[in-house]
Amino acid sequence: MAVAALPFARLSLVETSNPSAVSSPWKSTSRSIRSSDSFAITPLTHVSSKGFSFSQVTRRPLIVVAAAPPKKKKVDSAIKRARQAEKRRTYNKARKSEIHTRMKKVFVAIEGLRKEASPSVEMLTPIEALIGEAFSTIDKAVKVGTLHQNTGARRKSRLSRAKRTVEIQLGWYTPSTAAAV
């Protein structure tokens, strides 16, 4: 094949279709080689490793497949992420604000109990209800992911510690010392 290709290096192939009225999808074509020197070999249809072959070659038709453009443009992921982040930010801010509000209510109630002239144990019941609501709100925020688990535990500890401090000051609670084992 290398021997046959070298002498025709400057030649170009020209295709002509056969003008026959055949309804077959395979159309036969004949090729001829032309050069600038008007040298032509007709019909050269197939070159094999054994030499030239003058048999007719049938070619398959060219089929072009193109995908249809998408019907609707997808939303840009950066725009979608920004929209989602804004929605989550406002949701998380509302949760945190609720936590701060409930904690402040507990601290204000504890401070009012501390300043009371003659406090009683029954006055502690509404404070315990407020602490329970604050704990519930903190636990929900931790479950959803607004607060980290350690942050939630720290906030609940602050509330419990404030209540225990008031109970110790008013003499309603005496901490027990841990016995050495």
Image: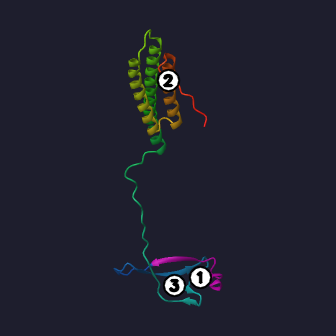
Which residue in the rendered view is the most extreme toward the top? 117
How far is the residue under mark 3 from the one under mark 1? 16 Å
> Mark 3 falls on what kind of element?
loop
Q: Closest to the observer: 42 or 96?
A: 96
| Residue 135 at x, y percent in the picture | 43, 31
Q: Which residue is mark 3?
A: 45
| Towards the viewer: 180 or 49 | 180
- Residue at horizontal 47 percent and vertical 14 percent from the top: 114
Which quadrant holds residue 98? Answer: top left
- Which numbered disc, 3 or 1, marks the residue closer to the eye? 3
- The amino acid at mark 1 is Phe
Foreground mark, 1 or 2, reads 2
Query: Is 8 above or below relative to 52?
Result: above
Q: Amino acid at mark 2?
A: Arg
Please state the extent of the stretch shown in magenta in the rendering: 1-16
Please name the residue that numbered disc 2 is placed on.
164
| Spot occupied by residue 82 in the image (x, y as percentages of width and height) | 47, 38
The kind of residue on which mark 3 rests is: Thr
Q: CA distance from mark 1 to mark 2?
A: 111 Å
Give whichever of discs 1 and 2 has the lower sequence position: 1
Which type of secondary structure does the marked residue at label 2 adopt?
A: helix
Q: Is residue 24 magenta?
A: no
Asked whether the residues under the numbered discs 1 and 2 touch, taking CB atoms below 8 Å apart as contact, a structural biologist would say no
Q: Quadrant of residue 86?
A: top left
CA neighbours of label 1 inside 10 A, class few (<14), some (14 to 19), many (20+): few
Q: Which mark is residue 39?
A: 1
